[in-house]
Amino acid sequence: QVQLVQSGAEVKKPGASVKVSCKASGYTFTSYYMHWVRQAPGQGLEWMGIINPSAGDTSYAQKFQGRVTMTRDTSARTVYMDLSSLRAEDTATYYCATDLHEFSSSSPGNWGQGTLVTVSS
Amino acid sequence: DIQMTQSPSSLSASVGDRVTITCRASQSIVSYLNWYQQKPGKAPKLLISAASSLQSGVPSRFSGSGSGTDFTLTISSLQPEDFATYHCQQSYSTPLTFGGGTKVEIK
């Protein structure tokens, strides 16, 4: 079965960067695009972007353009989300999620457990 | 960007009640609408895709309907394990966008 295991919680200072990993198992890694979605404490869900694990191409929400980088290591079956110039408003739980369908980019289907990133001086 | 508006933002209901949550899109999204359930401290779980397609393993008391701009999630007989927050999400175009969520609480 699909399993996504994310890296552990992080505490960062304003202005720093954070890199969250998401290790996949139980499916053909290169066939399912990976979304990143975040959720600030007590708030709704916010889509950050998506990566095609096969070709490595990405699409980011405009809000995060210039600050977010999504990459993958196919041999390790792992995708990464790097967010720079952190500010307090970036405090949130960050989720990776595979798309529901192969070679599709519309529906986060299977989700990781989430990684809490806290930005505080 | 397509704006998604859910209502109500919260509701109180009893076990056995019929519950309806609505989601409205700022433009037509045809039937490109997903529903998620999220329990405290947990990741969202996909319940329904393409407005009305129940995911495998999801109880049949959950159903979705609608097209264009107006959509509905219905729980026909609320069970104790259904107390959670429900989110809609448009899958019509990027950036993907979510509604603000509806928290279903115990009356």
Image (tube, grey):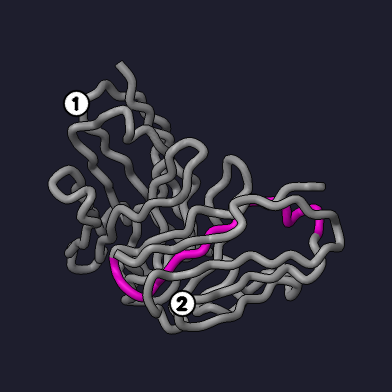
The x, y position of residue B13, in whole percent, is 79, 54
Q: In this view, does A67 lie to the left or right of B76?
A: left
- Answer above or below: position of B12 versus A2: above
State which chain disc 1 sits on: A
State which chain disc 2 sits on: B
Residue receiving disc 2: B69
Instruction: Find numbered disc 2 in the image and state the secondary structure of the residue it sits on.
Output: loop
**Residue at x 32%, y 41% (from the top left corner):** A20
> Is residue A80 covered in magenta?
no
CA gap between label 2 and label 1 equals 40 Å
Most foreground residue, A56 or B102: B102
**Residue at x 52%, y 76% (from the top left corner):** B70
Residue receiving disc 1: A15
The x, y position of residue A120, in whole percent, is 33, 20
Q: Residue A63 carries which label?
A: none
Range of magenta residues: B79-94
**Residue at x 44%, y 59% (from the top left corner):** B98
Asked where in the image residue B18 lies, by quadrant, the reply is bottom right
Residue situated furthest top in the rendering: A121
Which numbered mark, 2 or 1, is in the foreground of this view?
Answer: 2
